[in-house]
Structure formats: C-alpha cells, structure tokens
Amino acid sequence: MSAGQAFHQGEKIRMEEGKLIVPDQPIIPFVEGDGTGRDIWRASQRVFDAAVEKAYGGKRKIHWLEVMAGEKAFQQTGNWLPEETLTAFREYLVGIKGPLTTPVGGGIRSLNVALRKALDLYVCLRPVRYFKGVPSPVRRPEDVDMVIFRENTEDIYTGIEFELGTEANERFKALLSEHFPQEYQKIRFPKTAAFSLKPISKEGTHRLVRAALRYALQYKRRSVTLVHKGNIMKFTEGAFRNWGYELAEQEFGDQVYTWAQWERTKAVKGEEAANAEQDAALKAGKLLVKDVIADIVFQQTITRARDFDVLATMNLNGDYLSDALAAQVGGIGIAPGGNINYDTGHAVFEATHGTAPKYADKDMVNPGSVILSGEMMFRYLGWNEAADLIIRGMEGAISAKTVTYDFHRLMEDATLLKCSEFGDAVIHHMDD
Ligand SMILES: NC(=O)C1=CN([C@@H]2O[C@H](COP(=O)(O)OP(=O)(O)OC[C@H]3O[C@@H](n4cnc5c(N)ncnc54)[C@H](OP(=O)(O)O)[C@@H]3O)[C@@H](O)[C@H]2O)C=CC1
Ligand SMILES: O=C(O)CCC(=O)C(=O)O
Ligand SMILES: [Mg+2]
C-alpha cells in the first residue's frame, strides 16, 4: 500500500512545537528486511500488537504500513529503496525496519546508510544493558549499562571513495600530487592506492554531542565519554573531541564538568587543584564529560565497565563499538537501536545486527533485537505501558530459560525455541 493512500486507517504522528503528537491509532511504516528479517519481523510484530492490546485494551492500536526496501523492493519494483518508502518515513515520522543486506567490495551502497542520510537521522542510539540470566563471556555483565550515541550522517559512511583502476582515482591522485605534494609524498604505494574520504564537521559533532548531553542530563547518567582516535586523525577525530568539549562548556556550562576544564586548571594550578575541582563539581551533581581514545575503549569497557555510561562517537567507531559492547550482554541477538533526528522528530528503529543470511527463513534467530527496538520506539512515542510489558516479557522468557539458539548454546538446561516461539514466550511472560 502506498504512503499517500487516504483510505488507510489510522492517523499520522506529528511534531508540533518540538513535541511529538501521537494519536491513539498511529500509522507506523515498517520494512521487514532481508535475510532473517522476514522471520524476525513476523515474531516481533506479534509481540508489539500483543503489548499494545494488553496495555491499552483496544483504546490504542498500531496501523502497520508495509513499505519496501532491499531485496523485496528490488524484486517488486526494480528499485532498492523506492521513493515511496522515503516518503512514507518522512510523512509518518516514526517507523521501524529489519536489516538490509549491503554487498562487500562493490555493488549497491548501504540502503541503511542511505535512509539515515535521506531523513537526516543524525543519532544512532544504541543502549547496551544486561538482562538477568543472559549468558555472557564476562564475569560481571550486570556492570554494563551504557548508551551509545553514534553520529549517523558523516565519517567514511559518506561514501566518497576512489576505486583503484578508475579514471576518478587517477584524477584524485593528480589533484593530490599537484595541490598537496607533501601529503601525496606520504602515500606508501601511490600507484596501487585506493582512497576513502572522512568528512567530520563541527555542526555534525555539535548536534550529536548536544543530543548525548541532553539525554545524559535528562536521565541523570554519570558521564558522557567522547570516543575518538584523535592522536592519529587530529583534524577529524581529534576535532570531534575538541568540538565536543567546546559544545559541552558553551551550552551546558553550569551542568557539566569537562576534562578540558581539568586540563586547564592543572596547567595553571597543578594536578591536585584540578582533582579537587573535579571532585567538587561531581559532588555538586554535575555531569562528567570526558574522552577516551578509540583503541583502549574496547579494553576498558570490558575491564572497567562501570567507568562508562553514555558514549558519544563518530560513525565508524560507534559501529564497531556497538557490536563489541553487545557481546558483553548476550550478543547481537539482543542489541536494539534507533536512528533519530531530535529536531524534526523523524525516527526509524532497527536492530544493531544485520541480515545473518545463513539463517534466513529457518525460523531460528533471536528476534530480541527488533523486539527491543520496538520497545525503544514505544518509549519514544510515550507508550511506556506497552514498552514495560515488552521488558517484562523478555525478562520472563529469559529467566525461564526458554531461548533461541544463540543463548541456548551458552546456557545450561535451557529449552531451545524457534524465532517465532520466542516471540510467543515473550507475549506469554507479559502476564507474569
Ligand atoms: N542495519 C542493518 O540493516 C545492518 C545490515 N548489515 C548487513 O547484514 C549483512 C550480514 O552482515 P554480517 O556482518 O554477517 O552481520 P550479521 O549481524 O548479519 O550476522 C553476524 C552474526 O551475528 C549473529 N547474529 C546476527 N543476527 C542475529 C540474531 N538475530 N540472533 C542471533 N544471532 C544473530 C550470528 O552469529 P553466529 O554465526 O555466531 O550464530 C551471525 O552469523 C551484511 O550485508 C551487512 O552489511 C549489518 C549490520 C546492520
Ligand atoms: O548498512 C549496513 O549494511 C551495515 C550497517 C551497520 O553495520 C550498522 O549500522 O551497524
Ligand atoms: Mg554495525
């Protein structure tokens, strides 16, 4: 059904004066996704409808609107990401999607990235929390309670690349050697080098860090950590850190204490004075804004998880970090997310994982990531009662040890469920 068809029941979600207006019968567009997306969507949609029905007894209802993207769209329309799909997500403001396949080393560019860019969904929000009973490779998974704010529209995901052997690559190299001879000299094997460009802007950094800080202050989190590889990429990743501190001090000065402030005090008054200043600020309830280099963050989030809370990252670092952190709390089968523009209200919720093609149509994988992405969507809509039921259902199914293969292989005495059966178990445990 097309986005604009007037006879579709339900109403549009709107944004008015910076506030989301959610009717009781909203139209929500969804993409089921490629590969395992099909199985996962079927299970998840049942969970969402059950949660809404149980929470509101018929007063509220979602009118699902299927929109096409990926393989299904290509088969049916010859287009991987039809304009109608973008129009639907634009018009109805809030949607949800399954994973879409991106070929490696050639072929189409990521449809996921294209959607994020088209709707300017500049925050990729990925909470990482522990559910009791989930199998984990670390000793204290309950210490993991982090929220990733990943920049979603810049970085190497911009897709400006020059492939070896193409005329564009030769022209790009000629431009470098003519206009930037010193930089050109640094290329180890210029004859066989390909290139990717990495734009990182002050504007893009500011809006991402602003969103992370607002979230941290609203939910009374302990800290926001800026993640970067600024020692090596000084003017992109290093600038991300500097602009992040700048924004924090300029816009949230009376509510935060930054490590940039600590450095300045140390330079003038010494380390002891800087430590005392930080202690006093934290005692006064200020939010700590700090930074970490992107390699050590992968170690420290494991060895001292409690030191990390909200993490603000550029696009690639956040992509890596989301899968890595998910491993500590049960893996990618239970890692939700949302792509959000807090200014326009547009949001598309989706799992952190991909299409896992080897499991496609086997009714086997964990639908938990999409189910929890729906939970995030309900909270975004203010439907907290439905969201709470989903959490209760997930907790109940996991603590009853009725789980899909990914958890089953790591748990003792668990019952192996199919993807669809896990959805049923979540619904069943909503009544716990
Ligand atoms: N937002 C999106 O749409 C995303 C799309 N992708 C795309 O997906 C495709 C495949 O990517 P790939 O790198 O293989 O990553 P995937 O996340 O698709 O799969 C990697 C592994 O993660 C585990 N896994 C994934 N999903 C689940 C699940 N629901 N339940 C349990 N385990 C799960 C499986 O592990 P095991 O083998 O151990 O069982 C699987 O083999 C690529 O084309 C990629 O571009 C990737 C990420 C995000
Ligand atoms: O777009 C893709 O295929 C991969 C995206 C991805 O890995 C992510 O957003 O986490
Ligand atoms: Mg990823």
Image (cartoon, rainbow, N blue to C red):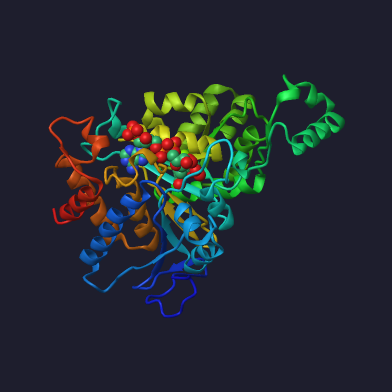
The image shows a total of numbered marks equal to 0
Is residue 222 in view?
no
Between residues 164 and 19, which one lies in front from this camera angle? 164
Residue 297 shown left or right of residue 189 in the figure: left
Q: Nearer the viewer, residue 377 or 82?
A: 82
Q: Is residue 73 above or below residue 322?
A: below
Between 191 and 52, the one nearer to me in the picture: 191
User: Where's residue 319, x and y in %?
Assistant: 49, 38
Q: Nearer the viewer, residue 115 or 138?
A: 115
Q: Residue furthest bottom?
A: 7
The residue under the point 49% across, 54% down is 340
Q: Quadrant of ligand 1?
A: top left
- Across and down, in percent, residue 29 comes to 42, 64
Question: Looking at the picture, does residue 157 appear above or below residue 43?
Answer: above
Percent coordinates x, y for residue 146 in the rendering: 39, 39
Q: Position of residue 13 (x, y in %)?
A: 44, 70
Most distant residue in the right direction:
178
Residue for point 26% across, 59% down: 46
- Side of 11 relative to 123 (left or right): left
Quarter of the image with the N terminus is bottom left
Q: Is residue 21 left or right of residue 187?
A: left
Relative vertical location of residue 257 with respect to residue 382 in this rendering, above or below:
above
Quarter of the figure with residue 47: bottom left
Check the image and report above or below for 193 versus 247.
above
Residue at the extreme top of the image, as rendered:
188
Q: Is residue 3 visible?
A: yes
